[in-house]
Amino acid sequence: MSRVRVHNFTVSLDGFGTGEGQRLEEPFGHAGSRLLQWAFPTCTFMDMGLHGEGTGSTGIDETFAGRWATGIGAEIMGRNKFAPTRGPLTDDWRGWWGENPPFHTPVVVLTHHPRPPLELEGGTTFHFVDATPVEALELARELAGGLDIRIGGGATTVREFLQADLIDELHIVVAPILLGRGERLWDGLEGMEDRFVIESITSPSGVIHLTFSRRGD
Amino acid sequence: MSRVRVHNFTVSLDGFGTGEGQRLEEPFGHAGSRLLQWAFPTCTFMDMGLHGEGTGSTGIDETFAGRWATGIGAEIMGRNKFAPTRGPLTDDWRGWWGENPPFHTPVVVLTHHPRPPLELEGGTTFHFVDATPVEALELARELAGGLDIRIGGGATTVREFLQADLIDELHIVVAPILLGRGERLWDGLEGMEDRFVIESITSPSGVIHLTFSRRGD
Ligand SMILES: NC(=O)c1ccc[n+]([C@@H]2O[C@H](COP(=O)([O-])OP(=O)(O)OC[C@H]3O[C@@H](n4cnc5c(N)ncnc54)[C@H](OP(=O)(O)O)[C@@H]3O)[C@@H](O)[C@H]2O)c1
Ligand SMILES: NC(=O)c1ccc[n+]([C@@H]2O[C@H](COP(=O)([O-])OP(=O)(O)OC[C@H]3O[C@@H](n4cnc5c(N)ncnc54)[C@H](OP(=O)(O)O)[C@@H]3O)[C@@H](O)[C@H]2O)c1
């Protein structure tokens, strides 16, 4: 069975996966770019072509970051990761990532305002669906050709899949900042440690990498 | 000037410093003894005589735990660390720690229900005061004879002193558990990283030790 994975999802010390006040100029709201500061210099993020030019780092942060694409056949994301708007999705919005997004797989976008699929270059097609996590996962599995499914965020979506106990493998990064407000990742997950082996390691960049692997896996 | 320090204060991954439903049999409520599991086997906690017999560990966890007493002249704690009750403090309650508590200094207990001081063996005297953090600190400094002040918890009290920006040195331990409910440490502390250099290290016991030192110190 294909596995359901989360990679590189970053929270502040106080547990927020995004800030307050998302808008076109600030996808993370008042958090700005602070959450993912650790990731931008890595090879993996540099290669996405979204964070400047250069070769990128190959240290501890890259070792974690680099796992996000391998073996992935589809991503599931929330509509606030896809778009800064609320309510119906407008036809002119094609995502934050330009005409050749870094996903290169089908992407299921969860939304209460479905619209027709959007096919971009490089193998990325966005499918907009109003579905429960279980249904979305079923669809993603059909689209993934036997490969793994990545739950790509934001906080609401990752939390929803954790609460439904649908995630097999979770990589969380804790950034040493306090956002104070925004969307919390950890709400309603009491006792999750019973289902996962949790390991952690710190990186010279200042973040802490946490891995959650299912007990018995 | 004497310094204001926090040591060994432990939060769950989701940021709770104590659970819900404190009572005589469960000082940490539904969290039970899970938060401080890392600390019990250390030399420092073993020597308090509250956590079993033995010599105690001398590794990474002990290296952090052992700093709590050195140079401390007084502690400030909240009344829920002192007692499991709410409302007026009853005369028969003498703290959780027996007749010879491990503090061996004056202890200022913050409460809206003051009562006369309680002197126990080994140098521990509890002073019950209704005071702002600044006032409590002033009193603790008078009692501490030039030595440092420890803010001993619980979560509400540490948070209150952090919010008032009165803490110079903070050691926080993150335990890999999700409590889901209880008293949060990090609320209302947006941007605290601007005032502190934050470092972290993981321990083989599974916890993460975080140190916060004032920038420019
Ligand atoms: N910290 C990180 O590493 C990281 C990673 C990725 C993204 N992000 C950031 O996270 C932010 C977005 O996170 P978020 O928590 O605000 O939102 P999100 O998880 O991206 O999206 C939540 C929205 O998706 C729709 N949705 C979710 N589940 C649904 C379901 N079962 N059925 C139908 N619709 C559903 C709803 O939108 P509608 O009702 O409006 O359709 C819901 O409000 C963005 O700022 C993004 O940049 C952070
Ligand atoms: N995680 C750890 O490492 C750690 C360390 C120590 C303790 N703990 C645990 O934390 C729990 C207690 O934490 P908590 O957050 O519930 O409470 P707490 O911080 O111990 O006490 C809060 C109470 O102290 C009184 N108080 C606080 N500030 C005051 C002020 N400025 N003026 C007057 N009164 C004031 C109030 O009580 P009244 O209004 O009722 O007087 C308030 O409800 C206990 O379970 C303890 O075992 C955990």
Image: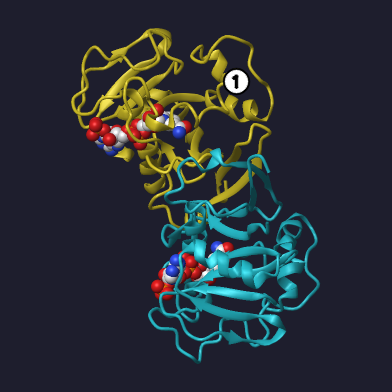
Chain colours: A cyan, B yellow
Cβ of mark 1 under 8 A from ligand 2? no
**Could you tell me residue B206's position as x and y percent?**
63, 36
* In front of the other: B97 or B68: B97
Q: Which residue is mark 1?
A: B41
Image location of residue B101, percent across then percent down: 42, 14
Kindly tell me whether residue B153 is visible in this rendering: no
- Where in the figure is residue A158, as x and y percent of width and height? 52, 60
Q: Chain of mark 1?
A: B
Above or below for A65 versus B175: below
Vertical arrangement, residue B190 with respect to residue A82, above or below: above
Is residue A180 visible in this depiction of the protein? yes
Residue B135 occupies which quadrant of the picture?
A: top left
Q: Residue at x 56, y 26 (%)?
A: B39
Residue A62 figure quarter: bottom right
Callout 1 secondary element = loop
Left or right, residue B165 beside residue A47: left
The residue under the point 54% across, 19% down is: B45
Above or below A112: residue B130: above
Q: Residues within 10 Å of mark 1 (few under 14, many from 20)?
A: many
* Amino acid type, mark 1: Pro
